[in-house]
Amino acid sequence: MFVARKGDPIVCPNGHIGGHVERDILPSETLKPRGDFSITITNAGNHTSEGHSCAQCPERITRYSNGVYQIRTARGWIGHLS
Ligand SMILES: [Zn+2]
């Protein structure tokens, strides 16, 4: 368990940067796509109903499920899936 810090990069497992964290995010938080939006995606591939893929490889940088997101940081996935 870890806290994502404001400014942390959002990265795929191959190290490609896809965006950054806009505020500190606790492991227990649910990340909703509207309202309190806590990440900025600047460089992503396709956005599907399952989340964003990396712009440069097939890996995912976000997961979307049941109305909430998980995002991938250098330390792993954060965001509580409902
Ligand atoms: Zn990648």
Image (tube, rainbow, N blue to C red):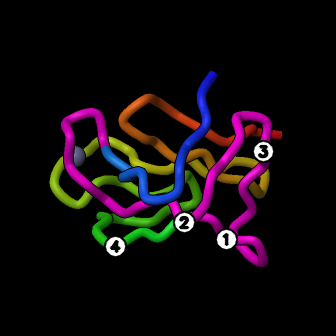
Going by the image, does 32 lie left or right of 54? right
Q: Quadrant of the N terminus?
A: top right
Q: Secondary structure at mark 2?
A: loop
The number of numbered discs placed on residues in the rendered structure image is: 4
In this view, the residue farthest toward the left is 56
Q: Residue at label 2? A: 22
Q: Quadrant of the C terminus?
A: top right
Q: Residue at label 4? A: 42
Q: Nearer the viewer, residue 66 or 15?
A: 15
Identify residue type, mark 4: Thr
Q: Residue at label 3? A: 29
Identify residue type, mark 1: Phe
Q: CA distance from mark 4 to mark 3?
A: 22 Å
In this view, the residue farthest toward the bottom is 35
Of circles 2 and 4, the one toward us is: 2
Please report whichever mark, 4 or 3, sits nearer to the chain's N-terminal start: 3
Residue range corresponding to the magenta coloring? 12-38
Identify residue type, mark 2: Glu
Q: Nearer the viewer, residue 46 or 37?
A: 37
Identify residue type, mark 3: Glu
